[in-house]
Amino acid sequence: MNPFELTRIIKEKARALGFDKVGVAGAGPLPKADFLKEWLSRGHHGQMTWMENYVEKRMDVRKLYPQARSVVAVAMNYYTPFEHNPAPDSAKISRYAWGRDYHRIMKKKLKHLLREIRELDPELDGRLFVDTAPIQDKLWAEQAGIGWQGKNTNIISREYGSWLFLGELVLNRELVYDRPIRDFCGSCTACIDACPTDALTPYRLAAEKCLSYITIEMWDRPIPASIQSRMEGWVFGCDICQDVCPWNRFQKPSEEPAYYPENANHHTTVKELEALTEETYKTRFKKSPVYRAGYKNFMRNVRALKKEGALSPEHDRDRK
Ligand code: B12
Ligand code: SF4
Ligand code: SF4
């Protein structure tokens, strides 16, 4: 099958499987890949020491999968039309974790896609990734024209804003490639101005200061006092730099039922979460990304919200 026809079929099948955006890039060098080394050398990854592993593979997909010729980048919209609990003791779980874990959902769809296209051409082969290997999902999404990397460092699309999960199907076949789109941030600095911990400078994130890192990836350490007073009620992850982004006015409800809130995860309070035991935590969050934090760290976050000034300030409760 010629590359034009194969590309057309792959995109059509990806959309039919529920991917909201799909783009294709050649598996060559990535223009911004080198920034990773600089980011690591500045220690911005904090305790995420696993990011120091396989750096060369993270920068070049052909080192991860030598037969790679093309990268099919996919994205799923996870925005659901719900808001956080406006109660004064609201404990906010970030949007991406209200429903089921996207890794499983997207991997299943990508496996399906690979199987279907292999039926058309048995010599075609590939590997699939959803934040599951040393690969830079955002760079591939950008390269394949899904969106641009905004000043808040997330991939933003003109159709869905930044509420997108990303993944890739890396194939051993040449395809027809899309082009990156331009950066539409312009002179806006809303995300940088709104970040409560000053973790952002344009296009760069000091993860060690980011509430998302602190509440999800920083394990077995107390939350620094300087951060506690700036938590603005976030118990797991943080959406502030996306909530304020003007491109998220174009958000659309997701068509994937699995991303809709379960167990009223969008509507939690400190009081309610405080009552969780290890067992009820596990039952409640088993299928949610929240499970990653683990009971001990999650409860550390809940307790931190009880400290003076850690809850959402009144003027911010309806930031959206
Ligand atoms: C580590 C990680 C984190 C870390 C660090 C985040 C980060 N910005 O890198 C922490 C724990 C903080 C985090 C938080 C979140 N994450 Co996260 N995370 C990742 C992970 C595993 C790796 C990202 C990575 O490689 N970072 C390393 C640095 C070097 O990358 P970077 O910030 O993109 O760096 C670029 C810029 O800094 C730029 N750059 C650097 N210097 C300069 C200078 C100039 C002049 C310019 C122009 C550019 C530039 O170039 C770099 C390379 O592109 C990816 C999955 C994956 N395997 O890719 C998910 C991923 C990025 N996360 C995701 C999500 C959803 C989130 C959260 C929204 C979750 C939440 N609500 O709490 C937040 C967002 C916070 C934020 N503002 O970024 C999604 C993002 C989807 C999207 N639309 O972009 C991903 C892609 C997972 C997925 N498969 O869907 N995450
Ligand atoms: S996720 Fe929150 S803490 Fe992290 S950069 Fe965005 S606004 Fe700042
Ligand atoms: S808030 Fe403004 S600067 Fe930040 S990512 Fe969105 S458009 Fe870009």
Image (spheres, helix red, strand yellow):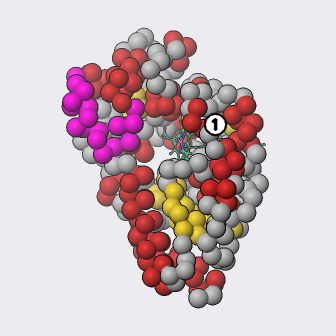
* 218 in the magenta segment: no
Q: Secondary structure at mark 1?
A: helix
Quadrant showing the N terminus: bottom right
* 289 in the magenta segment: yes
Q: Nearer the viewer, residue 241 or 40?
A: 40
Q: Is residue 93 left or right of residue 68?
A: left
Residue 190 visible here = no
Q: Nearer the viewer, residue 51 or 229?
A: 51
Q: Amino acid at mark 1?
A: Glu
Q: Residue at x 50, y 82 (%)?
A: 122
- Mark 1, Cα crowd under 10 Å, few <14 / some 14-19 / many 20+, is some
Q: Nearer the viewer, residue 151 or 316?
A: 151
Name the image quarter holding residue 235: top left
- Considering only vertical position in the picture, is 5 above or below 218? below
Name the dominant secondary structure of the magenta segment: helix
Q: Residue at x 31, y 58 (%)?
A: 257
Q: Is residue 150 left or right of residue 75?
A: right
Residue 115 visible here = yes
Q: Residue at x 54, y 72 (%)?
A: 125
Boundaries of the magenta span: 275-293
Q: Nearer the viewer, residue 152 or 293?
A: 293
Residue pointed to by mark 1: 52
Q: Is residue 110 left or right of residue 245?
A: left
